[in-house]
Image (tube, rainbow, N blue to C red):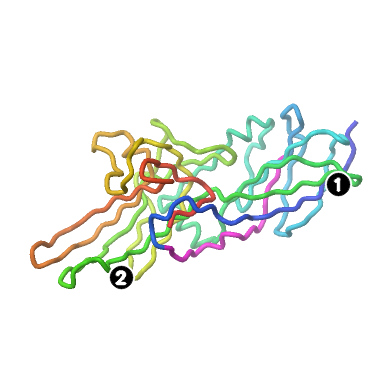
Amino acid sequence: PQNMVSVEIEFNVPQLDTKSRTYVHSEFIAEEDRINWFHYYVYDSKGMLSGYGKCGSSAETRVSMHLNSNAEYTMYAIANGPEISPVPATENDILNSAYQNESLGGLNSEVEDCPRLMMTAIAALEANDEGYKVRLDFRRMTARIGLSFDTSALNNDVSLEIKEVSVVNIPSQVYYFKENAPVEGLKCLSSACSVVPSGLDDKVVFYCYENVQGELLPGNSSQMTKFFPESSRYNELCTYICVKGTYSSPRKRGEIIYRLYPGRDASDFSLERNSVYD
């Protein structure tokens, strides 16, 4: 029989994982470690919903739930995000639940209006004398991309002006609890997060939802050759940074466009959650 038992909840927000050092380190604008609230969902060993609720920002809290003693339960938690509606009745339902990103401004506009990042955690409940205890190690659903410009290698008579920096192909939806890898037929935003730097010293930061496309150029070792032919379908699937500017020298002048693909290395095109690409 089920009894009203106490569940002690602790949570922690580990540091972002560094996946790449392609770019110079840049500052960030969001409160990356802050949790204002989180929704939790508890499932039994058969994957059926046993309870759900909402907690505040306290790093340690207790909730009461109708649970069997010394049974197996798993808690799924979403911080700084909406309650899933309808409430997922099974563990399979919550694993297939996704957040719909409807902002054409991508995540930057959300960060400016509400400087918190959505995070998720999964953990097993551990039985104790008072009921259960669980520790939630939250992971951010976004990656952070930092971009700054180093022109020290240019000749003194050469000038470069950055007109616009944007992130293209941010997924229109992201799974809360499983890897997010958009495929053909799943809409991605065609462009998002355009920023006009005030100068070459201006550091640009984007927060982007996960887009794991994996290793697409096996054997490629240079960032200079990390791109696809114009006809490739990956041009519409992989998240990339587009830098537009003007170039001037005694011999040439005109517009320039750079396309930069984040990833673990020159062959990988995965933008992973809870990671930083500087």
Position of 10 with respect to 275 (left or right) is right
Which residue lies at the image location 32% right of the left edge and 64% below the top edge? Answer: 149
Q: Quadrant of residue 93?
A: top right
**Going 14% across and 60% down the picture, which residue do you hit?**
254
> Could you tell me what secondary structure mostly forms the magenta stretch?
loop
Residue 142, position as x, y percentages in the image: 51, 50
Q: Quadrant of the C terminus?
A: bottom left
Looking at the image, which is closer to me, 146 or 113? Answer: 146
Neighbourhood count class around disc 1 (C-alpha, 10 Å): few under 14, some 14–19, many 20 upward: some
Secondary structure beneath label 2: loop
Q: Which residues are magenta?
A: 25-41
- Three-letter code, disc 2: Gly
Local crowd at mark 2 within 10 Å, few (<14), some, or many (≥20)?
few
Inspect the image, locate mark 1, and give the three-letter code of the amino acid beneath it: Ser
Q: Position of residue 54 (x, y in %)?
A: 72, 49
Instruction: Name the quarter where the N terminus is drawn.
Output: top right
User: Looking at this rendering, what residue extends furthest in the left direction?
Assistant: 251
Give the residue drawn at x 23%, y 54%. Answer: 257
39 drawn magenta? yes
Q: Which mark is residue 6?
A: 1
Front one among 222 and 127: 222
User: Which residue corresponds to mark 2?
Assistant: 199
Say if the magenta span includes residue 38. Answer: yes
Q: Mark number for residue 231?
A: none
| 1 vs 2, front mark | 2
Question: Is residue 34 placed above or below 130 in the rendered structure?
Answer: below
> Is 236 in front, or is 18?
18
Q: Position of residue 131 (x, y in %)?
A: 87, 44
For the residues marked 1 and 2, what is the alpha-carbon distance in whole angstroms? 55 Å
